[in-house]
Image (spheres, rainbow, N blue to C red):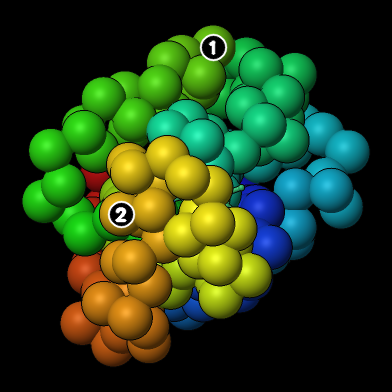
Amino acid sequence: MKVLVGYMSQTGNTKKVAEAIFSQIQADKEIKSLDEIQSLGGYDLAFIGFPLQGFAPANDAKVFLEQHCAGKKLALFVTHAVPEGYEELPGWLDKCREAAAVGNVVGCFDCQGELAEPIAEVLKQSGDPKMVGFGEMRPSTMGQPDEARLERARAFAREVMAK
Ligand SMILES: Cc1cc2nc3c(=O)[nH]c(=O)nc-3n(C[C@H](O)[C@H](O)[C@H](O)COP(=O)(O)O)c2cc1C
């Protein structure tokens, strides 16, 4: 069994989750950023992770899923700045699953990640009350993903590997 953990991460949050997942895989395994991956040929299972951007999977990740994941066994992991209970989040995660629907998705993990300061500043100055609200969330996101979230990611990895 050969397993790949592939991730996209601009500010390190999704990378932390990727490393937590990778640590739990007891099999022939590799970890790579999405831009280092030429093909998923040869892997029996790929964990693919990325941040939400603009209420949807980050575009590079969406393109990767559509171009490289057809027919592959996939487990998704996603980070986002909003808290896990945020009411619009299920719809945004559905868009991630839709982008991966070319593959066989066996699991989907998500957790909060820190909202980077430059992004929060742009949002706060946008003039759009909804975006300003997102920017003002930054203090409550700081330090995420924390150890409890990383432990949930490890448990997700063990669960997928046991399937
Ligand atoms: C351009 C941009 C758009 C974003 N859009 C969203 C969003 O729609 N919803 C959300 O919860 N977080 C959003 N975020 C926050 C990131 O998803 C979050 O900080 C994530 O953990 C970043 O992961 P990374 O450090 O691996 O890049 C956005 C961040 C950026 C840079």
Return the residue nearer the eye: 83 or 35. 83
- Label 1 lies in ligand 1 vicinity (Cβ under 8 Å): no
| Residue at the outermost front position | 127
113 or 2: nearer the eye? 113
* Residue drawn at (54%, 12%) of the image: 102
Q: Is residue 81 above or below residue 73?
A: below
In the depicted view, which residue is nearer to us: 22 or 81? 81
- Dot label at residue 133: 2
User: What residue do we see at 72% from left, 24% from top?
Assistant: 63
Residue type at tag 1: Val
Residue 75: quadrant of the picture: top left
Q: Position of residue 154 (x, y in %)?
A: 31, 71
Query: Label 2 CB, ligand 1: below 8 Å?
Result: no
Rendered view: 122 above or below 146: above
Q: Which residue lies under the disc numbered 1?
A: 102
Given residues 146 and 152, the one toward you in this image is: 146
Q: CA distance from mark 1 to mark 2?
A: 34 Å
Of callouts 1 and 2, the N-terminal one: 1
Q: In the rendered view, does 154 fall on the left or right side of 16?
A: left
Nearest to the eye among marks 1 and 2: give it: 2
Q: Is residue 20 above or below residue 111?
A: below
Residue 116's disc is: none
84 with respect to 36 (left or right): left
Total labels: the figure holds 2
- Is 34 located above or below residue 40 in the figure? below
